[in-house]
Every structure is written in C-alpha cells, then in structure tokens.
Image (cartoon, grey):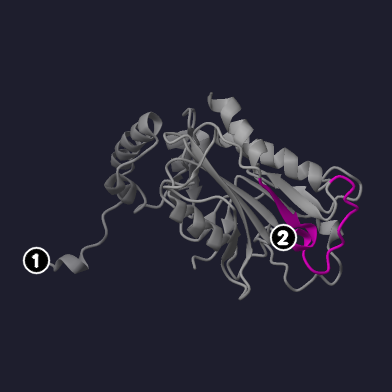
Amino acid sequence: VKPESSSLPPRPFDFPAFRKQFEKAYDQFYRFNKIDDDLLAELTQHNLTEEQFDKLTLHKQYQRYISLIDGKVWFSEVPNKPHGEIAHLLLIELSSQLQERSPHGVLKGCGDNGIIPFLNVLTL
Amino acid sequence: LLLNNPPNEKRPDAAFRLRENQIPNPPPPWIRYLANGAPYPNVVVEVAVNNESPQKLMDDADRYFSPITSTRVWIGVKVWLKDKKFWVGWAERAANGVGATIHTTMQWPPNHHPWDTDVNTIYQIPMALIYGPGIPIPPMANSGAFLHIDTDMIRQEIVECLM
C-alpha cells in the first residue's frame, strides 16, 4: 500500500544543496545588498548548527553582516555612507553631553559592539 | 537593518544604558532587563540611509517602546541620497506606555529638507526624561538640563561625507 504523503518521514537536511543556495544568496548580497525574497524565504526554512553556519560564513568578506539567530541565517543590510559617520557623530555627541566618561556618569554606551547585539522587542 | 528581519528583534545604531552600579536598590519599577541581565538602553539611535521608507523608520521607533523594553528616548536620522535631503527627529514613549510619540520640526517627502540649506533647529530633550524617574542625574556642566541635538551639525556631517 502506498503511504499517504502526510505520513512520509521528513527528508533529511541536504546541507550541500543548502550551501549552493546560500552561496547564490551571498553573491546577491555582496553585489547588490539585496536578496531575492523567494531565496531568503527558502534559506530561513532550515535550522543550522553553529558548525554548519561557520562552514558557510568563515572567511567571507561580509561575514560580520550575517548572523545565526535561533538556528536561522539572517543577513544584515550593509549600511550606505554616511550611515556610519552619522551614527558615530551622534555617539560621541551623546557621550559628551551625558558625561559618560566622568566619575558621575550614569549612562554607558552599548552600541553594536556585542554587548547588546539585538534588542528583543515586541511587534506592536 | 536586516534584510530578513528576525521576528521581534531590533538592533540600534547606537545606544546608552544605565550602569548597573548606578541603579538604586530596589530598582525603579519601570526598568526592564535584557536576557543577559543588562538593563534595556534608555537611549537608542537609528540612522537610515536609503533602503528604508519613512513608515519603516516610524514603525521601528514604535517597536523600541514596546511593553517589554524600558527605552525612554529614540533619536532618528533619515537620509535620501538621490534627493539630497534628510530628516532628524526624536521620540519618547507615548502617554499610554506603548509606542512612540515623535517630535520633529522637519517634514517627510515630498517636503523633506535639502541638506544644502540650514535647518536652524536644535532639539532639546529633557535630561529627566532620558534618565527616568528614580535615577540620579549627574551634574550636567556642559548641557544643562537638556540633551541638545543640533540638526545642522548632522547636516554638515552629511555634506562633508558626500560632497
């Protein structure tokens, strides 16, 4: 008796095939700072281990813009100039006015330096 | 900014949080904490250069003021490279406790501000709002009782970078 499709066991994760799709996405990301929606959706269907993620991303120029969060691959947008300059200007301006470095400093800078890589926020 | 946004996560371009040793014991009830035990930032900065609509920037501002955060002030900058225009604004938590109340003198497209023209606006954000109830405000010799955000200082930075 032919089993119904719903009773079939899930296919094992085909990492080499995933890697091909990832490389295609990375090429788009590197050259255009954009990735086809369908390709992105396909990539985020699968869960990766840290080891698999490292195999995909180590030694890539835009490695720092790719993250593994809850097993999924996420691509951060590579900022355009003058994004970094404005962010830095505001950082030093706020730091100065908030007297961050003074012995009385109450607030402390905690930008994108690994202290809070992501804020968990609820979608309203 | 993420090309494929993980649900419920957001990364600011700069942020300031309370030092743990400056938080009174017991802590004021409005403070919320991240999973790593650090308090949520009081101040977050978001810079957007193209690739993001004004609505997206506003939606993201709202998300920083969700019920599980204790963000008090958001500062946003938007730059349109093609149009050579920009926008600066700031936000505080809405009166009902959720979402952003935006403060700005600058307009959105099609009436957004050209970066080759002075804005002549300095936003003044109350320090008491930034630090929050129950948190001691350090002596502010340089800025008095307000945090100043000079829109023309930002404008000049854009011009210097891109001209």
- Seen as rendered, the residue at the extreme left is A1
Residue A84 figure quarter? top right
**Label 2: chain letter:** B
Q: Amino acid at mark 1?
A: Lys
Who is closer to the viewer here, B158 or A122? B158
Displayed quadrant of residue A17: top left
Q: Is residue B132 magenta?
A: yes
The residue labelled by disc 2 is B39
Residues rendered magenta in the picture: B121-142
Q: Is residue B159 above or below residue B104?
A: above
Image location of residue A119, percent across then percent down = 59, 56
Q: Nearer the viewer, mark 1 or mark 2?
A: 2
**Horizontal and vertical percent position of residue B89:** 60, 52
Q: Looking at the picture, which amino acid does disc 2 mark? A: Pro
Residue B152: mark: none
Residue projecting furthest to the top: B163
Which numbered dot is residue A2? 1
Picture coordinates of residue B66, whole percent (x, y): 58, 67
How many numbered tags mark residues here?
A: 2
